[in-house]
Image (cartoon, rainbow, N blue to C red):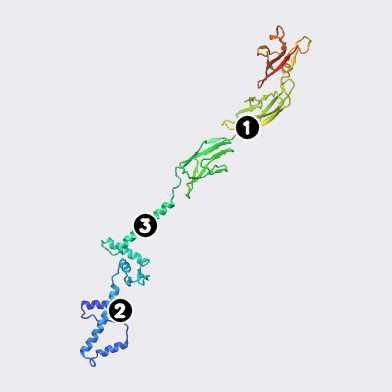
Amino acid sequence: MHIESKGTDPFEQRLKDSLGQFEVPYNSADWTQLENALDGNKRGWWGTRARVSAVIAGLALLAGTAWYTVNRPEVPESMTAEAQRSGSTTNIEPMGPVGEKPATVSETGSGHLAAVEPEGDLASSKADNTDQQAGQGVKNSPEEPQRTAVASTSASSRSTQAALSSTKEAPSPSSDAAFHSSVAEGCPGTSVEFKVANMPADGIYLWNFGDGNFSNKANPEHTFTKPGTYQVMLSMSAAGVGSIQNKPSSEVIVIHEAPMAAFNVLKQEYDGHLPSVHFENRSMAGKSYHWDFGDGQSSTVAYPDHIYKKKGIYHVELTVANAIGCEDKLMKDVVVDKDYNLDAPASFSPNGDNFQETFMPEALRTLGAKFNLQIYAPNGTLLYQTTDASKPWTGRPQNRGALCAPGEYVWVADVHESLHLSETYTGKVRMER
């Protein structure tokens, strides 16, 4: 429908502008009736004017309703919620601007309709409008309680997130936790102690010693049996914490090479020589040696000879050390078949029958070795000594004067067959008449 604008006052112009966007349904019968009513031949002038006024009033009422619908102010949501709580009937959120999603209407349990917050972009737009009003200094806005509730909810959410974060991020082992070893270098067989500092009492440990061995003790002790350079690693964590810290040792542990002990046993039983055992040293990387002959005697000579005076089985052990101090040991058994005591006779009788008239161990006559023979009385008095095998003891003090009383006398012979073979022999001899 088009309305002419000639001679219109401001009210009529606003009415025209409001009705200009609406289309009134067209019905030919109605318009025919209207034309007949306007016909001056059938109706009076006042009747015609009344009918036209009625039509115009109806159109004005329709236009005013449409304009109010389009320009109706938005009711604050807080007022809608308050009306719902007070038991009011229906509160329907008006439709927003063109293109925006309208608010959703739901029915409450009491039979009333309640406004439901819009979703998506419309909600964002309303929030922006609220912020804009706050920035312009609007006071006592109906939406102020809602903003307070939102702020309180956000603060509560942040507190909840902080609590969850503190629960998840439990204390981890101190970054200052470290460990040290009792020694930095050693030899095969060296036992090393490890201790951890600044670690919680409920810590969890896994030690990797680098030689294929592991331990879960807090302060373990480990023995390295093979030479090499080892980087010890400690993986640790506090109880209930998923993160694991790996701590390598600040210095590697060096296990040096050890020498290898080896020797052969060679018996020396030749005429004119003391029956001895020669030890052929076959050790490797040794600097010092220590022999334990198993009869209470020892030596530090690299290639020793030793005389066993009594028959038996002797456990000989060689200990070899290198320049660093690493050692290796080897033990072997030596079997001695008979006693040896310089072939000294058990008795003699200086009675003038030219049979066993003097005393001299037989070996001292045949060895050709240097010796010193001493004869002692039972009370410890030195009766005779000689270094000459051709001057045996005759049974007299210093081989002069009267014969000593019959009985047992102690003899001691220090024999030096070579630079490395010196031995002291002792025994008893009975002097008879």
- The amino acid marked with disc number 3 is Ser
Q: Residues within 10 Å of mark 2 (few under 14, many from 20)?
A: few
**Label 3 vs 1, first from the N-terminus:** 3
Q: Quadrant of the C terminus?
A: top right
**Label 3 vs 2, first from the N-terminus:** 2
Based on the displayed image, in which of its 4 quarters is residue 87 positioned?
bottom left
Nearer-the-camera pick, 303 or 344: 344
Q: Position of residue 281 (x, y in %)?
A: 66, 29
Q: Are marks 3 and 2 in contact (CB under 8 Å)?
A: no
Q: Which residue is under mark 2? A: 22
Q: Secondary structure at mark 2?
A: loop
**Label 2 vs 1, first from the N-terminus:** 2
Residue 329: image tag: 1
Q: Position of residue 157 (x, y in %)?
A: 38, 57
The answer to whether residue 180 is left or right of residue 271 is: left
Q: Position of residue 238 (x, y in %)?
A: 47, 47
